[in-house]
Image (spheres, grey):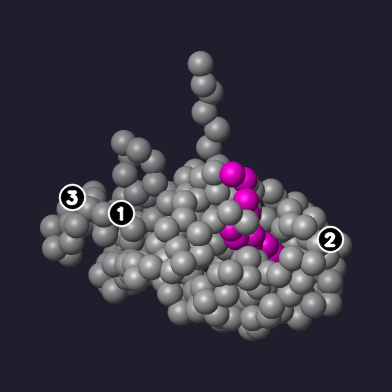
Amino acid sequence: MKAAVRPTSVRPSAAEGPRFQEILDALRADISDGRVGVGERLPTEQELCLRFSASRYTVREALRRLQDLGLIARRQGSGSVVTAARPDGRFHNTLSSLAEIGQYASSTRLEVLAVEKILVEGRTAELLRSQPDTPWVRVVALRRQPGERTPLCYTEVFLPAAFDDVAQAIGTFPVAVYAVLESRYGLRIEEVVQSIEATSADANLASRLSVEVGTPILVVIRHYLDAEGNALEVAVSSHAAGRYRYEMTLQRSG
Protein backbone atom coordinates (compact mmCIF):
# COMPACT_ATOMS: atom_id res chain seq x y z
CA MET A 1 0.00 0.00 0.00
CA LYS A 2 1.61 3.24 -1.15
CA ALA A 3 -1.08 5.61 0.10
CA ALA A 4 -0.18 8.11 2.80
CA VAL A 5 -1.68 7.28 6.18
CA ARG A 6 -0.98 10.45 8.18
CA PRO A 7 -4.34 11.95 9.16
CA THR A 8 -5.10 15.62 8.67
CA SER A 9 -7.55 17.86 10.45
CA VAL A 10 -9.94 18.00 7.48
CA ARG A 11 -13.38 16.62 8.31
CA PRO A 12 -16.27 15.83 5.96
CA SER A 13 -19.17 18.24 5.98
CA ALA A 14 -22.65 16.95 6.83
CA ALA A 15 -25.39 16.94 4.23
CA GLU A 16 -28.18 19.50 4.42
CA GLY A 17 -30.24 16.86 6.16
CA PRO A 18 -32.90 18.62 8.26
CA ARG A 19 -33.95 21.02 5.49
CA PHE A 20 -34.52 18.49 2.72
CA GLN A 21 -36.09 16.11 5.24
CA GLU A 22 -38.65 18.78 6.11
CA ILE A 23 -39.52 19.19 2.43
CA LEU A 24 -39.57 15.43 1.89
CA ASP A 25 -41.98 14.92 4.81
CA ALA A 26 -44.29 17.69 3.57
CA LEU A 27 -44.43 16.27 0.04
CA ARG A 28 -44.99 12.74 1.33
CA ALA A 29 -47.92 14.07 3.35
CA ASP A 30 -49.34 15.81 0.26
CA ILE A 31 -49.20 12.52 -1.62
CA SER A 32 -50.42 10.18 1.13
CA ASP A 33 -53.32 12.53 2.04
CA GLY A 34 -54.41 12.76 -1.59
CA ARG A 35 -53.70 16.45 -2.13
CA VAL A 36 -51.60 15.34 -5.09
CA GLY A 37 -53.05 12.18 -6.58
CA VAL A 38 -51.44 9.31 -8.48
CA GLY A 39 -50.83 10.43 -12.04
CA GLU A 40 -50.73 14.11 -11.14
CA ARG A 41 -47.65 16.32 -11.32
CA LEU A 42 -45.97 17.85 -8.33
CA PRO A 43 -45.25 21.60 -8.45
CA THR A 44 -42.17 22.53 -10.42
CA GLU A 45 -38.79 22.84 -8.75
CA GLN A 46 -39.06 26.61 -8.93
CA GLU A 47 -42.49 26.56 -7.28
CA LEU A 48 -41.20 24.26 -4.53
CA CYS A 49 -38.22 26.55 -3.94
CA LEU A 50 -40.62 29.44 -3.40
CA ARG A 51 -42.99 27.42 -1.24
CA PHE A 52 -40.30 26.20 1.11
CA SER A 53 -37.86 29.13 0.76
CA ALA A 54 -35.21 26.57 -0.13
CA SER A 55 -32.42 26.23 -2.64
CA ARG A 56 -32.88 24.27 -5.85
CA TYR A 57 -30.23 21.79 -4.62
CA THR A 58 -32.24 21.10 -1.45
CA VAL A 59 -35.49 20.68 -3.36
CA ARG A 60 -33.85 18.31 -5.84
CA GLU A 61 -32.51 16.20 -2.98
CA ALA A 62 -36.01 15.89 -1.49
CA LEU A 63 -37.39 14.92 -4.92
CA ARG A 64 -34.63 12.38 -5.43
CA ARG A 65 -35.55 10.70 -2.18
CA LEU A 66 -39.22 10.66 -3.11
CA GLN A 67 -38.15 8.83 -6.26
CA ASP A 68 -36.06 6.41 -4.18
CA LEU A 69 -39.22 5.62 -2.20
CA GLY A 70 -41.07 4.81 -5.43
CA LEU A 71 -43.56 7.66 -4.96
CA ILE A 72 -42.70 9.73 -8.03
CA ALA A 73 -41.11 9.41 -11.46
CA ARG A 74 -38.86 12.24 -12.63
CA ARG A 75 -38.23 12.90 -16.30
CA GLN A 76 -36.36 15.81 -17.81
CA GLY A 77 -38.79 18.24 -19.36
CA SER A 78 -41.83 16.50 -17.85
CA GLY A 79 -41.46 17.29 -14.17
CA SER A 80 -42.26 14.92 -11.31
CA VAL A 81 -45.31 12.68 -11.59
CA VAL A 82 -46.80 10.84 -8.62
CA THR A 83 -46.71 7.08 -9.23
CA ALA A 84 -47.85 5.69 -5.87
CA ALA A 85 -49.54 6.93 -2.70
CA ARG A 86 -47.43 4.74 -0.42
CA PRO A 87 -43.79 3.60 -0.62
CA ASP A 88 -43.45 0.20 -2.25
CA GLY A 89 -40.89 -0.89 0.33
CA ARG A 90 -38.14 -1.20 -2.27
CA PHE A 91 -35.15 1.12 -2.41
CA HIS A 92 -34.60 2.47 -5.92
CA ASN A 93 -30.96 3.26 -6.61
CA THR A 94 -29.76 5.00 -9.77
CA LEU A 95 -25.98 5.38 -9.92
CA SER A 96 -23.94 6.96 -12.67
CA SER A 97 -21.21 8.74 -10.69
CA LEU A 98 -19.17 8.57 -7.52
CA ALA A 99 -21.16 11.49 -6.13
CA GLU A 100 -24.37 9.48 -6.37
CA ILE A 101 -22.82 6.73 -4.25
CA GLY A 102 -22.28 9.43 -1.64
CA GLN A 103 -25.93 10.45 -1.90
CA TYR A 104 -26.99 6.84 -1.37
CA ALA A 105 -24.90 6.70 1.79
CA SER A 106 -26.34 9.94 3.15
CA SER A 107 -29.95 8.91 2.46
CA THR A 108 -29.67 5.72 4.51
CA ARG A 109 -28.03 4.84 7.83
CA LEU A 110 -25.67 2.11 8.96
CA GLU A 111 -26.25 0.15 12.14
CA VAL A 112 -22.85 -1.33 12.99
CA LEU A 113 -22.95 -4.85 14.39
CA ALA A 114 -19.24 -5.61 14.73
CA VAL A 115 -15.77 -4.24 13.96
CA GLU A 116 -12.84 -6.65 13.85
CA LYS A 117 -9.23 -6.73 12.72
CA ILE A 118 -8.42 -9.68 10.47
CA LEU A 119 -5.53 -11.20 8.56
CA VAL A 120 -7.01 -12.02 5.18
CA GLU A 121 -6.50 -15.33 3.45
CA GLY A 122 -8.13 -17.60 0.90
CA ARG A 123 -11.34 -16.32 -0.67
CA THR A 124 -11.33 -13.15 1.42
CA ALA A 125 -7.86 -12.24 0.14
CA GLU A 126 -9.09 -12.85 -3.42
CA LEU A 127 -12.15 -10.66 -2.81
CA LEU A 128 -9.99 -7.83 -1.49
CA ARG A 129 -7.31 -8.35 -4.17
CA SER A 130 -4.86 -8.50 -1.31
CA GLN A 131 -1.81 -10.56 -0.45
CA PRO A 132 -2.54 -13.30 2.13
CA ASP A 133 -1.81 -12.51 5.78
CA THR A 134 -2.32 -8.78 5.17
CA PRO A 135 -4.11 -6.96 8.03
CA TRP A 136 -7.51 -5.42 7.26
CA VAL A 137 -10.44 -4.19 9.32
CA ARG A 138 -13.89 -5.69 8.70
CA VAL A 139 -17.04 -3.78 9.64
CA VAL A 140 -20.34 -5.67 9.68
CA ALA A 141 -23.49 -3.56 9.53
CA LEU A 142 -27.14 -3.35 8.53
CA ARG A 143 -28.21 -0.50 6.27
CA ARG A 144 -31.67 0.93 6.83
CA GLN A 145 -33.86 3.58 5.30
CA PRO A 146 -34.98 6.32 7.70
CA GLY A 147 -38.08 5.24 9.60
CA GLU A 148 -37.93 1.65 8.34
CA ARG A 149 -37.36 -1.28 10.71
CA THR A 150 -36.68 -3.86 8.00
CA PRO A 151 -33.02 -3.76 6.90
CA LEU A 152 -32.33 -2.62 3.37
CA CYS A 153 -29.20 -4.75 3.20
CA TYR A 154 -26.47 -6.55 5.13
CA THR A 155 -23.11 -4.89 4.49
CA GLU A 156 -19.49 -5.81 5.06
CA VAL A 157 -17.00 -2.97 4.68
CA PHE A 158 -13.29 -3.85 4.45
CA LEU A 159 -10.59 -1.23 5.01
CA PRO A 160 -6.79 -1.63 5.16
CA ALA A 161 -5.64 -1.77 8.78
CA ALA A 162 -3.98 1.66 8.42
CA PHE A 163 -7.49 3.15 8.31
CA ASP A 164 -8.66 1.57 11.57
CA ASP A 165 -9.73 4.96 12.98
CA VAL A 166 -12.20 5.42 10.11
CA ALA A 167 -13.46 1.85 10.49
CA GLN A 168 -14.14 2.42 14.18
CA ALA A 169 -16.19 5.53 13.37
CA ILE A 170 -18.38 4.03 10.62
CA GLY A 171 -22.01 4.64 11.45
CA THR A 172 -21.31 7.96 13.17
CA PHE A 173 -20.91 10.14 10.06
CA PRO A 174 -23.61 10.88 7.44
CA VAL A 175 -21.38 10.54 4.37
CA ALA A 176 -19.83 7.73 2.37
CA VAL A 177 -16.79 5.97 3.85
CA TYR A 178 -14.66 6.78 0.80
CA ALA A 179 -15.34 10.52 1.35
CA VAL A 180 -13.98 10.28 4.89
CA LEU A 181 -10.86 8.47 3.67
CA GLU A 182 -10.27 11.17 1.08
CA SER A 183 -10.74 14.09 3.46
CA ARG A 184 -8.92 12.63 6.45
CA TYR A 185 -5.94 11.15 4.65
CA GLY A 186 -5.66 13.31 1.56
CA LEU A 187 -6.41 10.36 -0.71
CA ARG A 188 -8.31 10.28 -3.98
CA ILE A 189 -10.55 7.52 -5.27
CA GLU A 190 -9.97 7.35 -9.01
CA GLU A 191 -12.20 4.41 -9.89
CA VAL A 192 -14.97 2.28 -8.44
CA VAL A 193 -15.28 -1.23 -9.87
CA GLN A 194 -18.71 -2.70 -9.22
CA SER A 195 -19.98 -6.23 -9.71
CA ILE A 196 -23.49 -7.55 -9.15
CA GLU A 197 -24.37 -11.19 -8.66
CA ALA A 198 -27.33 -13.26 -7.56
CA THR A 199 -27.21 -15.80 -4.75
CA SER A 200 -29.47 -17.15 -2.02
CA ALA A 201 -29.61 -16.46 1.70
CA ASP A 202 -27.65 -18.78 3.97
CA ALA A 203 -28.52 -19.04 7.66
CA ASN A 204 -26.49 -15.96 8.59
CA LEU A 205 -27.95 -13.71 5.90
CA ALA A 206 -31.46 -15.00 6.54
CA SER A 207 -31.14 -14.11 10.22
CA ARG A 208 -29.69 -10.66 9.53
CA LEU A 209 -32.25 -9.71 6.88
CA SER A 210 -35.26 -11.40 8.53
CA VAL A 211 -35.97 -13.69 5.56
CA GLU A 212 -36.17 -17.42 4.98
CA VAL A 213 -33.08 -19.47 4.18
CA GLY A 214 -32.84 -19.75 0.40
CA THR A 215 -34.44 -16.36 -0.30
CA PRO A 216 -32.97 -14.77 -3.46
CA ILE A 217 -30.25 -12.25 -2.65
CA LEU A 218 -28.71 -9.53 -4.82
CA VAL A 219 -25.06 -8.93 -3.90
CA VAL A 220 -23.37 -5.67 -4.90
CA ILE A 221 -19.57 -5.58 -4.52
CA ARG A 222 -17.68 -2.31 -4.90
CA HIS A 223 -13.90 -1.87 -4.99
CA TYR A 224 -12.78 1.71 -4.39
CA LEU A 225 -9.38 2.10 -6.07
CA ASP A 226 -6.68 4.76 -6.09
CA ALA A 227 -4.70 5.78 -9.18
CA GLU A 228 -2.33 2.81 -8.75
CA GLY A 229 -5.17 0.31 -8.49
CA ASN A 230 -4.87 -0.24 -4.74
CA ALA A 231 -8.13 -1.06 -2.99
CA LEU A 232 -8.74 1.58 -0.32
CA GLU A 233 -12.17 0.20 0.51
CA VAL A 234 -14.18 -2.86 -0.46
CA ALA A 235 -17.91 -3.00 0.31
CA VAL A 236 -20.12 -6.07 -0.05
CA SER A 237 -23.86 -5.39 0.27
CA SER A 238 -26.45 -8.18 0.24
CA HIS A 239 -30.07 -7.20 -0.52
CA ALA A 240 -33.09 -9.45 -0.07
CA ALA A 241 -35.43 -9.82 -3.04
CA GLY A 242 -37.98 -7.05 -3.30
CA ARG A 243 -36.06 -4.52 -1.20
CA TYR A 244 -33.71 -2.98 -3.74
CA ARG A 245 -33.71 -2.08 -7.40
CA TYR A 246 -30.59 -0.92 -9.23
CA GLU A 247 -30.85 1.21 -12.34
CA MET A 248 -28.24 2.49 -14.75
CA THR A 249 -28.34 4.35 -18.04
CA LEU A 250 -26.10 3.40 -20.95
CA GLN A 251 -25.43 5.96 -23.66
CA ARG A 252 -24.05 5.31 -27.12
CA SER A 253 -20.72 7.02 -27.75
CA GLY A 254 -19.20 7.99 -31.05
Give x and y (percent) for residue 93: 53, 54
Instruction: Name the mark nearer the viewer: 1 or 3.
Output: 1
Residue 12 visible within the image: yes
Residue 229 highlighted magenta (yes or no): yes
Q: Amino acid at mark 2?
A: Arg
Tell me the crowding category of disc 2: few under 14, some 14 to 19, or many 20 or more residues within 10 angstroms, Cα based: few
| Above/below status of 213 relative to 4 | below
The residues colored magenta run: 228-242
Residue 8 figure quarter: bottom left
Residue 107 visible within the image: no
Give x and y (percent) for residue 130: 74, 57
Q: Which residue is mark 1?
A: 60
Badge 3 marks a residue whose secondary structure is helix
Q: Amino acid at mark 3?
A: Gln
Q: Which residue is mark 2?
A: 123
Counting the numbered discs, the total is 3
Q: Nearer the viewer, residue 176 or 202?
A: 176
Q: Earlier in the sequence, mark 2 or mark 3?
A: 3
Tell me the crowding category of disc 1: few under 14, some 14 to 19, or many 20 or more residues within 10 angstroms, Cα based: some
In 3D space, how far apart are the residues under numbered discs 2 and 3 (Cα atoms)? 52 Å
- The residue that appears at 63% across and 62% down in the rendered structure is 235
| Above/below status of 181 relative to 248 | below
Q: Which residue is mark 3?
A: 46
